[in-house]
């Protein structure tokens, strides 16, 4: 069997219609398949590859760490320079209250850790989450996911969780002295790039503070400059009690984290001891890669370019078939009439490599399947943005 046949036969499938391109190389903003065709990557591994594929700084850091050691002991038992260096860099670039990092192996695990931390610190069990939110697919993270379509097949899930509309007024009455935490995406990604309206997020922060409720902000997709500031919450004048990170955190390798104040985090170390542990969280190789990626992001001032690049997409996407564009920096949702049109467009954009110099690799959103996802590496150039917009417009004319 060839690799594609093995993929379909022996790799667990997550849908009945995988894209199934056989990628053999990725460099900069491009993917290359086994036939040599290249594709401009408009999703960057879903906000993972912020500093571009094959980033030389990241590769050098990985190579250096390979010569030292890989896994040696479960997270939190030994002093490992890749972890301490990265934790120091993260906390240096966060508000002072967010001073303690618990590394995990994924964003879903970061959500799980944060939920446990909120329950343990507050002594409460009630949680509030929002419709059309995505925080991961493990049992706890699934419990706070904002869609019954994905939750229903796996019930029973965690009790005590209330789901409300994002930007709703009713959440302020629902938060009370029995609420352990409110968990929200700073900007909803899978809903189709939905921003907090007005001062809603600030009021949410205030209500949580009034009731002793922990505010957990999920920036797994929108962190590391994706929305035009290093952290999206900076745009709304608030600071969460717990911050969730993942995706770009590892510079292309698997890494997640939940970050809180030391006074909060310390409750996981006693009664019971080892209140939260994992084997591969903060893996030395992943931390070395992540630190190098963040250093590159900061040194090259990539975040400062995000709003201009995002606006360039919006200004150059013109078609009567486009119903709406939601944009938050380089996280964009281009809405069409229905999922069929979006899915057809995605397929044709990939096949554009057959008759143009490159195809476009993109996707749709879990809770907004009628919308096209655009979340390229932050290193994308203005010329590449222009090419992407032109290709999308030309392809729409054929539909």
Image (cartoon, rainbow, N blue to C red):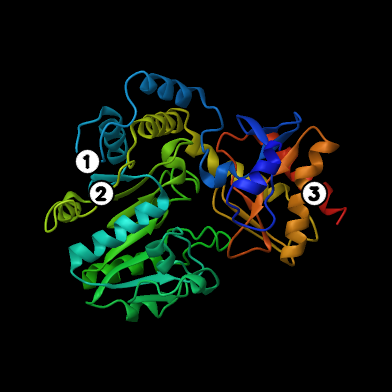
Q: Is residue 170 above or below residue 226?
A: below
For the N terminus, the quadrant is: top right
Which of 325/392 is in front? 392
Residue tagged by mark 3?
348
For mark 3, give the secondary structure. Answer: helix
Whether residue 318 is visible:
no
Circle nearer the viewer, 1 or 3: 1
Circle nearer the viewer, 3 or 2: 2
Residue 296: give x, y in percent of width and height. 44, 29
Q: With 279 as the anchor, is 381 left or right in this view?
A: right
Q: Earlier in the sequence, mark 1 or mark 3?
A: 1
Q: With 346 as the anchor, is 49 left or right in this view?
A: left
Q: Earlier in the sequence, mark 1 or mark 2?
A: 1
Residue tagged by mark 1?
76
For the C terminus, the quadrant is: bottom right
Label 2: few (<14), some (14–19) or many (≥20) C-alpha neighbours in 10 Å: some
Q: Earlier in the sequence, mark 3 or mark 2?
A: 2
Q: Is residue 381 above or below residue 259?
A: above
Q: Which mark is residue 252?
A: none
- Are dots 1 and 2 in contact, CB under 8 Å? yes
- Residue drawn at (46%, 45%), measured in percent from left and top? 247
Q: Quadrant of residue 65?
A: top left
**Inter-mark Cα distance, 1 to 2:** 8 Å
Residue 76: give x, y in percent of width and height. 22, 41
Label 3: few (<14), some (14–19) or many (≥20) C-alpha neighbours in 10 Å: many
Which of 269/163 is in front? 269
Q: With 20 as the anchor, is 223 left or right in this view?
A: left
Q: Which mark is residue 277?
A: 2
Which of 6/148 is in front? 6
Whether residue 31 is visible:
yes
């Amino acid at each position: 069997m060839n690799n594609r046949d093995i993929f379909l036969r022996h790799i667990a499938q997550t849908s009945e219609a995988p894209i199934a391109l056989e990628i053999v190389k990725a460099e900069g903003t491009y993917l290359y398949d086994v036939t040599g065709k290249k594709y401009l990557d408009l999703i960057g591994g879903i906000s993972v590859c912020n500093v571009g594929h094959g980033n030389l700084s990241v590769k050098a850091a990985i190579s250096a760490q390979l010569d030292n050691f890989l896994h040696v002991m479960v997270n939190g038992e030994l002093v490992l320079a890749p972890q301490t260096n990265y934790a120091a860099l993260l906390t240096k670039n966060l508000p002072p209250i967010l001073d303690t990092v618990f590394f995990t192996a994924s964003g879903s695990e970061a959500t799980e850790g944060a939920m446990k931390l909120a329950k343990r610190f507050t002594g409460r069990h009630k949680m509030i989450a929002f419709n059309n939110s995505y925080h991961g697919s493990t049992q706890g993270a699934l419990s706070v996911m904002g869609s019954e379509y994905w939750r229903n097949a796996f019930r029973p899930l965690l009790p005590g969780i209330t789901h409300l509309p994002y930007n709703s007024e009713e959440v302020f009455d629902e938060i009370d002295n029995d609420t352990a935490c409110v968990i929200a995406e700073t900007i909803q990604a899978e809903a189709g790039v939905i921003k907090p309206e007005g001062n809603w997020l600030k009021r949410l922060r205030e209500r949580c503070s009034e009731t002793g409720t922990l505010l957990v902000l999920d920036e797994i997709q929108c962190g590391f400059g994706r929305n035009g500031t290093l952290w999206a919450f900076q745009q709304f004048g608030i600071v969460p009690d717990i911050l969730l990170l993942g995706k770009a955190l590892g510079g292309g390798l698997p890494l997640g984290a939940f970050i809180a104040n030391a006074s909060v985090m310390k409750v996981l170390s006693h009664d019971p001891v080892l209140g939260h542990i994992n084997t591969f969280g903060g893996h030395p190789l992943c931390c070395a890669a992540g630190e190098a990626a963040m250093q590159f992001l900061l040194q090259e001032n990539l975040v400062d370019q995000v709003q201009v690049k995002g606006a360039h997409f919006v200004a150059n996407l013109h078609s009567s078939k486009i119903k709406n564009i939601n944009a938050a920096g380089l996280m964009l949702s281009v809405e069409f009439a229905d999922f069929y049109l979006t899915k057809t467009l995605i397929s044709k954009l990939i096949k554009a490599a057959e008759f143009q110099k490159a195809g476009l690799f993109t996707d749709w959103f879990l809770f907004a399947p009628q919308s096209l996802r655009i979340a390229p590496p932050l290193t994308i150039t203005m010329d590449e943005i222009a090419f992407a917009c032109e290709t999308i417009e030309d392809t729409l004319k054929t539909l």
